[in-house]
Image (cartoon, rainbow, N blue to C red):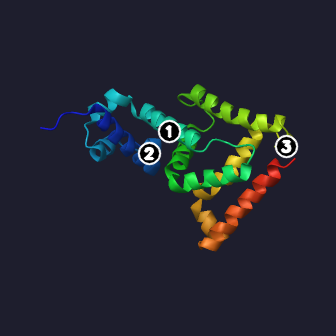
């Protein structure tokens, strides 16, 4: 019998939970499917992560942290940041799906671990505010509003691929043109 490896088991549970929540949302996700995919028993999931809502919150928090580390906001080069953000979400569409499901589930109600999320976004807003203070980004739009608008621009193509397909097309030239348009819109939003 192979020795137990709790960290490997937690990692398998985490990856299975990401896929399950991205596919089915919080309400539709099933712990038994996560356990089967992770080759772990349900009791371990509850022991390691708590209930289903807590597991979802942990999954989303960890995925958000990964994004923040992989794609820090750069007020000195907004277009390059938009490129990196769009590339990240193209490679990891599950994060935006998780956020979308969270929005459907919680609406405008307070989120589990919301104070952590507020700190996460406060750092991003502070980076944009620094760019505004240094004069490299417009201060005509408050930094928090600007961050919201820029992320919406960059993320929407991944969130609603059916609209992208219908409105923009499916070929590589179509994707390239849309990316250039998103970057131009971001440049105009942030220009002094």
Q: Position of residue 111 (x, y in %)?
A: 56, 31
Are circles 2 and 1 on residues that touch, CB within 8 Å? yes
Measured along the vertical axis of the image, is residue 133 above or below residue 67? Answer: above
Are circles 1 and 3 on residues that touch, CB within 8 Å? no
Instruction: State the separation of the CA atoms marked 2 and 3.
Output: 38 Å
**The label number, if any, that marks residue 21 in the structure image:** 2
Q: Quadrant of residue 73?
A: top right
Instruction: State the separation of the CA atoms marked 2 and 1.
Output: 9 Å
Instruction: Give the mark nearer the N terminus: 1 vs 3.
Output: 1
Element assignment for label 2:
helix
Is residue 31 or residue 122 the one in the foreground? Answer: 122
Element assignment for label 1:
helix
- Left or right relative to 85: residue 186: right
- Left or right relative to 137: residue 49: left
Q: Residue at x 77, y 59 (%)?
A: 184
Q: Position of residue 117 (x, y in %)?
A: 59, 31
């Amino acid at each position: 019998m192979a020795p137990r490896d709790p960290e490997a088991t937690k990692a398998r549970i985490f990856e299975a939970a990401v896929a399950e929540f991205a596919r089915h949302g919080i309400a539709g996700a099933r712990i038994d499917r996560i356990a089967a995919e992770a080759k772990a028993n349900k009791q371990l999931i509850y022991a390691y992560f708590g209930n289903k809502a807590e597991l979802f919150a942990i999954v989303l928090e960890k995925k958000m942290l990964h994004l923040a580390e992989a794609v820090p906001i750069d007020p000195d080069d907004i277009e390059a940041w938009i490129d990196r953000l769009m590339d990240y979400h193209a490679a990891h569409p599950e994060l935006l799906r998780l956020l979308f499901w969270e929005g459907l589930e919680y609406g405008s109600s307070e989120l589990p671990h919301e104070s952590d999320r507020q700190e996460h976004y406060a750092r991003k807003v502070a980076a944009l505010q620094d760019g505004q203070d240094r004069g490299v980004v417009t201060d005509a739009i408050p930094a928090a509003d600007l961050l919201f608008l820029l992320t919406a621009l960059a993320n929407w193509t991944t969130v609603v691929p059916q609209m992208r397909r219908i409105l923009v097309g499916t070929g590589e030239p179509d994707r390239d043109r849309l990316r250039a348009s998103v970057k131009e819109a971001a440049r105009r939003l942030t220009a002094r």
